[in-house]
Image (tube, coloured by chain):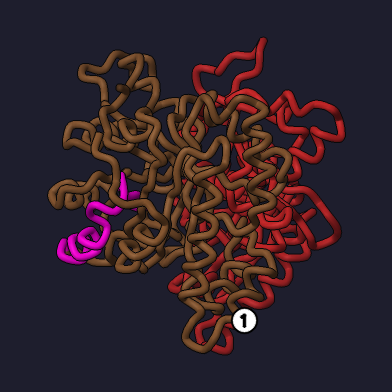
Chain colours: A brown, B red
Amino acid sequence: MKSGSNLEKVLTAGHFAFTGELGPPRGAHAEEVRKKAAFLKGQVDSVNITDNQTAMVRMASWAASLLLIEEGLEPNYQMVCRDRNRLAMQADILGASALGIRNMLCLSGDHCQFGDHPAAKGVFDIDSMQLIATAKKMRDEGKFLSGADLDGKPQIFIGAASNPFADPFEWRVHRLAKKIGAGVDFIQTQCIYNMEKFREFIRQANDMGLTEKAYILAGVTPMKSLGMAKYMKGKVPGMDVPDEIIKRLQGAAKGQQAEEGIKIALEQIAEFKEMKGVAGVHLMAIEWEHRVPEIAERAGMLPRPQV
Amino acid sequence: MIVAKRKPFDEIMQLIKGHKKVLVVGCGTCVAVCLAGGEKEVAVLSTELDMGRKLANNPVEVGSITLERQCDREYLAQLDGKVKDYDALISMACGVGIQFLAERFPDTPVLPAVDTCGLAVNQDVGWYEERCRSCGRCVLGLTGGICPVTMCAKGLYNGPCGGTNQGSCEISADQPCAWNAIYDRLKAQGRLDCILELQPPQEWKDTTPRTLIQPGYTKPEKAKA
């Protein structure tokens, strides 16, 4: 075991993993985190704790991760390169491991211009690829990025994101290969709506032997409404929402758009379970944590394996 | 070249508040080419300041001069003996020139009339685009002649990130994604292997003031005045 995290155990035992996501609050109320966590408890193997997502200031990812551990859930600590330099990142990795955080997700981070402090200076001292390599070096070699020895290797299962849909499509699988080469253990993809394109991406990854070197978790975000689908299609960079998704939501009976969105997600999950090279699903139910138990149940994901 | 943009008039007026006799000093090189601080812009600003202060019933005496360069001692020397006649200097040079002017005349306030905006190309008259952040460790040989430090909004060495949006950067549809462009160019040249390997973290060279001494030259004991 590299980290001994529940997620690592589930994946190495060959189970189809199911992870969730929780966005920390824009304030200091621990109760907000606990409330959301309660919906996810027992439903998923690990919960991503986002790090100032969309460049909006929120409770620190490590702090919300600790609250999650207190509630008996396993966090996947997200870390973006936008907000800290290599010293702070390595310090946070050591601190996270010391306090029992066992998974981390290495991300570039949305540009500051998206958020509530658009004039902030983005750090980007190192990029997500280099962060993966740094975490691996700390864990496996017991060395800092500088090469100096560290005393007490961090036990961290190292994850990263992959967006199969952003341009240039034909380069995306090579970028995935680079992340795996840098030392990533698992990948969670961007929200998938274009299944045809995703099938092609996974086929390429299988052909290159990548899916044997890292666990790929397919990203699923159920559409809550037609408005959300249109927003994702038109306004979110790197998102690929085909017209057929829009049409299905348009065709739903009054008050049934959310149900239709869940149905689409369930169909996707059913296909991912059978898809060669896909090791699990990462469910990003954005501000919809309370619907996760229902989705997990209907997707046949329960009970979660005890390993 | 170095490009700059004139500061808003009100800000310049605020900077010279309290001064009665000012010398506007232009620079005849980069900022003249980019229409920010050459002879013509010095004349315009001088006239504006003169009129603005008259309207405010607080007249100011404005002198004007444009040096060939403010980043060279030999040209700054032309001001020796003149500066004592003024109680402030307004420099229209880039940040380099402004500082060298202030260094030469440390007893006189030197005030900036422009904001320096980077190292840019001349796309057309009045239209300049940044291309270099002078990071000190050029990777253009690997990236198809497109700088990831300057042209990628996140300065990624292993891009593109997941925000590429139909060839544009996630920050704006008008900003091309640098890594998408790097990919396209290297692909056309048959050189995609250049970006297959992981680029290690940058050893930043621009975190302390840099001094450059070319081979064969030495730093004099004391700079000649």
Q: Which residue occupies 25% across, 20% down?
A: A153
Nearer the observer, A307 or B224: A307
For mark 1, name the chain: A
Q: Measured from the top left, where is residue A159 in percent x and y?
A: 42, 36
Outermost residue, left side: A70
Nearer the observer, B34 or B174: B174
Q: Which residue occupies 73% across, 53% down?
A: B167
Q: How crowded is mark 1: few (under 14 residues within 10 Å), some or many (20 or more)?
A: few
Q: Measured from the top left, where is residue A52 in percent x and y?
A: 37, 56
Q: Which residue occupies 39% across, 42% down?
A: A17
Question: In the shown orientation, is residue B101 left or right of residue A247?
Answer: left
Nearer the observer, B48 or A270: A270
Q: Measured from the top left, where is residue A83 in percent x and y?
A: 39, 48
Question: In the shown orientation, is residue A110 left or right of residue B30?
Answer: left
State which quarter of the image contains the C terminus of chain A: top left
- Report whether residue B81 is seen: no
What's the amino acid at mark 1?
A: Gly
Q: Is residue A49 magenta?
A: yes
According to the picture, the residue beneath numbered tag 1 turns out to be A251
**Magenta-highlighted residues:** A30-50
State which quarter of the image contains the N terminus of chain A: top left
